[in-house]
Image (cartoon, helix red, strand yellow):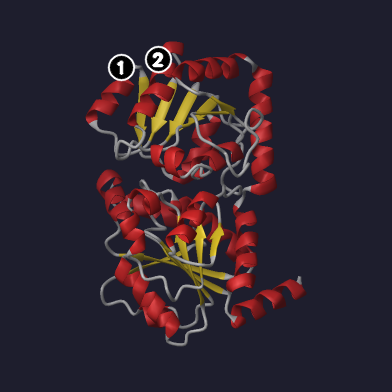
């Protein structure tokens, strides 16, 4: 089948975690013999910021790292109808321009046989509900929400009647242990500052514990204001700026422990959604200590796959335990990776997607799924 993904950007992962997930999904679809194409707008905030931050050469890294992936850029004169003429499945991400969201719906309604899905991986459904409520999703066959609480939000608001939970996951062909890497530091955190949604939490659960324990700490991310960078420097934390997601596994392998610091909108309004970083960290078998979040869907095994800390004092204690107890560190690393490999890889999500398509897909798509299953 031919899958077309409308994404904010596949080329750039600058402050854009959805690119991580879609790259993994597309790679798995291609490995199974499907076609997968991503369409992204000419004016992409993420891609523009990547070029401004790192230079145009950073765009070439995508083609080098992911040669099998096809990302096409569209502008105002682009013919979406032509691009979708031979598509079997079209998946539109929620950061897509509302006018494009509506246009694709009109193309679907005009008799095209592709299955049309809307994909939401953000907290705007609660933090900026008007943006989602204003979208025209009437012609969409289904909605993919990256957590059960978000799915319930769609149903309660009447934004769709066919809504599925489709969590993010790790591309385990990329996110894996690298045992030959030499340890160069103690603690690493890969995460963006971003909109003051976790500013206080970063200080409490990262900066202060690292300072108290005098850990050799590295932070990668973007959108850090000057005062945040000063806070890191005062704690003797190295700020590494942006890092390409494909290079994160090696960075993890060079450190002994990492942390998860969820954004406040998820903790308060969308419990059960960890976002993609914990999946990727656990896939790399690095011990993880998490700030508070409620795993309402039982995705992981708290206390076995990772440790939790209710506040900065507990985070300091948990980090000390992991760094001083090799057996505990190894147990966490092994258990976390075990859970990801059993339940949370992009292969699992493609399996789930095909099941969803068998439920809400067009007759043409369902026939192709049945034929493929029979052939296997």
x and y, in percent, of residue 104 in the image? 39, 75
x and y, in percent, of residue 96 in the image? 35, 63
x and y, in percent, of residue 262 in the image? 45, 36
Q: Residue at x 46, y 61 (%)?
A: 119
Say whether disc 2 or disc 1 marks the residue closer to the N-terminus.
2
Choose top left, top right, bottom left or bottom right for residue 181.
top right
Choose top left, top right, bottom left or bottom right for residue 257.
top right
- From where the camera sits, is residue 114 visible? yes
Q: Secondary structure at mark 2?
A: helix
Residue 19 vertical placement versus 336 (above, below): below
Residue assigned mark 1: 234
x and y, in percent, of residue 299 in the image? 62, 43
Residue assigned mark 2: 211
Q: Residue at x 62, y 50 (%)?
A: 345
**Quick check: 288 left or right of 224?**
right
Residues under numbered marks 2 and 1 in contact, where contact means CB atoms less than 8 Å apart? yes
Furthest residue toward bottom: 111
Q: Secondary structure at mark 1?
A: helix
């Amino acid at each position: 089948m031919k899958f077309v993904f409308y994404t904010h950007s596949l080329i750039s992962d600058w402050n854009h975690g959805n690119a991580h997930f879609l790259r993994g999904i597309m790679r798995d679809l291609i490995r199974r013999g499907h076609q997968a194409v991503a369409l992204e707008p000419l004016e992409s905030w993420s891609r523009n910021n990547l070029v401004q931050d790192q230079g145009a050469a950073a765009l070439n890294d995508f083609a080098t790292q992911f040669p099998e992936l096809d990302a096409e850029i569209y502008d105002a004169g682009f013919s979406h109808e032509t691009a979708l003429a031979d598509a079997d499945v079209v998946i539109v991400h929620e950061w897509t321009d509302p006018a494009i969201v509506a246009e694709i719906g009109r193309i679907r309604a005009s008799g095209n046989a592709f299955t049309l899905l809307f994909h939401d991986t953000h907290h705007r459904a609660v933090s900026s509900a008007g943006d989602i409520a204003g979208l025209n999703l009437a012609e969409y066959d289904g909605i993919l929400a990256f957590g059960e609480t978000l799915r319930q939000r769609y149903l309660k608001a009447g934004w769709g009647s066919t809504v599925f939970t489709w969590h993010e996951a790790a591309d385990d062909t990329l996110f894996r242990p690298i045992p030959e890497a030499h340890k160069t530091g103690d603690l690493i955190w890969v995460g963006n500052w971003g909109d003051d949604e976790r500013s206080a939490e970063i200080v409490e659960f990262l900066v202060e514990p690292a300072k108290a324990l005098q850990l050799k700490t590295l932070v990668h991310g973007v959108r850090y204001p000057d005062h945040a960078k000063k806070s890191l420097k005062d704690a003797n934390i190295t700020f590494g700026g942006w890092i390409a997601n494909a290079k994160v596994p090696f960075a993890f392998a060079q450190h002994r422990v990492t942390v998860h610091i969820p954004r406040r909108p998820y903790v308060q309004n969308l419990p059960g959604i960890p976002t993609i970083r914990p999946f990727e960290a656990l896939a790399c078998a690095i011990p993880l200590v998490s700030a508070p979040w409620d795993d309402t869907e039982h995705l992981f095994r708290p206390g076995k796959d990772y440790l939790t800390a209710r506040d900065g004092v507990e985070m300091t204690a948990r980090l000390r335990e992991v760094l001083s107890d090799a057996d505990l560190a190894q147990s966490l690393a092994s258990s976390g990776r075990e859970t990801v490999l059993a339940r949370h890889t992009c292969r699992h999500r493609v399996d789930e997607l095909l099941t969803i398509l068998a439920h809400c897909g067009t007759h043409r798509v369902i026939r192709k799924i049945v034929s493929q299953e029979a052939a296997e």
